């Protein structure tokens, strides 16, 4: 169990049923938050929430498509009615594909922008007014080390993640007068479905396990990052310890990126 740093708070985590989102949810739940697992896969969201509840924590699963204002509003209204006002928003939902620059087609570009960047805009636009009215709130966006440095064959992905950093900085200025902080976490190498997916996983284009080991070998601290590592970084921003920090983009990459 944790130390109750988020006791009594409601946290919505998009893409929360797996990968980094699930790691954040686990950390937040241990710290006393009621975590709402928002995910396109409703069954996975419900099942994960049930696991957390079985462990004596508080969780709810909701269907959430971050590309749809209607779905976001439906989910948010349900949360506010049944759980309470959303104190913490973690914009984590994301997708990734590997493409040579000249092979990025309209579908690749549009789908990446819609989920990774527009999804942050739409979800935040729905949740933020309540935070402003209460003069309290924490918004945490999941970017990437690819949001600070371009990487080959990921131009479309990098564009979205650079955009998340820019949106984080801009919004932080607008919300500061209302005691709402906006920060980003920039993960390094985390073995999530974005890497292993049979259709579009990054490892499909990187020689499988050899590609994975090549990535890991470049990490000064000698190990890949875990979803829980991202959870601890998000906890810092969400807890009282991070109350005077806004507009920051924190690398959690084992030293692989230091700017």
Image (cartoon, rainbow, N blue to C red):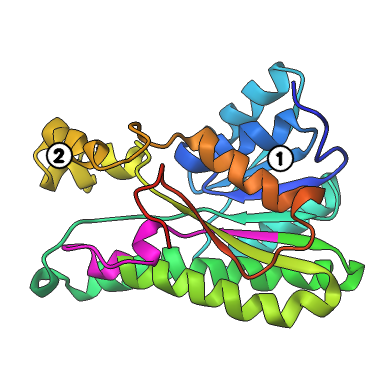
Query: Few, some or many C-alpha atoms within 10 Å of disc 2 (few <14, some 14-19, many ≥20)?
Result: some
The x, y position of residue 232, in whole percent, is: 61, 39
Q: Judge from the rendering whether residue 67 lies leftward or rightward of residue 213; answer left or right.
A: right
| Residue with the mark numbered 1 | 35
Q: Residue at x 23, y 42 (%)?
A: 215
Q: Residue at x 22, y 76 (%)?
A: 106
* Residue 154 falls within the magenta-colored stretch: yes
- What are the residue bounds of the magenta stretch? 139-157
**Quarter of the image that includes the N terminus:** top right
Residue 147's disc is: none
* Secondary element at image label 2: helix
Q: Judge from the rendering whether residue 24 lies leftward or rightward of residue 174; answer left or right.
A: left
Q: In this picture, is 163 found above or below 216?
A: below
Mark earlier in primary sequence (1, 2): 1
Q: Are marks 1 and 2 in contact (CB under 8 Å)?
A: no
The x, y position of residue 183, in whole percent, is: 62, 63
* Residue 124 falls within the magenta-colored stretch: no
**Quarter of the image that includes the C terminus:** bottom left
Alpha carbon of mark 1 to alpha carbon of mark 2: how far? 34 Å
| Residue with the mark numbered 2 | 211
């Amino acid at each position: 169990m944790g130390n109750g740093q988020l006791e009594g708070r409601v946290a919505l985590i998009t893409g929360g049923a797996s990968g980094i989102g699930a790691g954040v949810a686990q950390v937040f739940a241990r710290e006393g938050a009621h975590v709402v697992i928002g995910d396109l896969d409703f069954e996975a969201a419900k099942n994960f929430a049930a696991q957390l509840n079985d462990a004596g924590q508080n969780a709810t699963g909701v269907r959430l498509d971050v590309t749809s204002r209607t779905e976001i509003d439906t989910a948010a209204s349900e949360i506010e009615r049944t759980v309470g006002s959303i104190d913490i928003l973690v914009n984590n939902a994301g997708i990734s594909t590997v493409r040579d620059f000249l092979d990025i087609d309209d579908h690749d570009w549009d789908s990446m922008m819609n989920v990774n960047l527009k999804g942050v805009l739409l979800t935040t636009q729905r949740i933020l007014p309540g935070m402003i009215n209460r003069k309290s709130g924490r918004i945490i966006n999941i970017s990437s080390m690819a949001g600070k440095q371009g990487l080959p064959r990921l131009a479309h992905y990098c564009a979205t993640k650079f955009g998340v950093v820019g949106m984080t900085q801009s919004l932080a200025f607008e919300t500061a007068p209302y005691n709402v902080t906006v920060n980003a976490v920039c993960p390094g190498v985390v073995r999530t479905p974005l890497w292993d997916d049979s259709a579009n996983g990054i490892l499909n284009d990187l020689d499988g396990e050899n590609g994975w080991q090549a990535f890991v070998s470049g990490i000064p601290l000698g190990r890949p990052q875990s979803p829980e590592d991202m959870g601890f970084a998000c906890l810092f921003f969400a807890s009282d310890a991070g109350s005077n920090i806004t507009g920051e983009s924190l690398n959690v990459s084992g030293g692989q990126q230091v700017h």
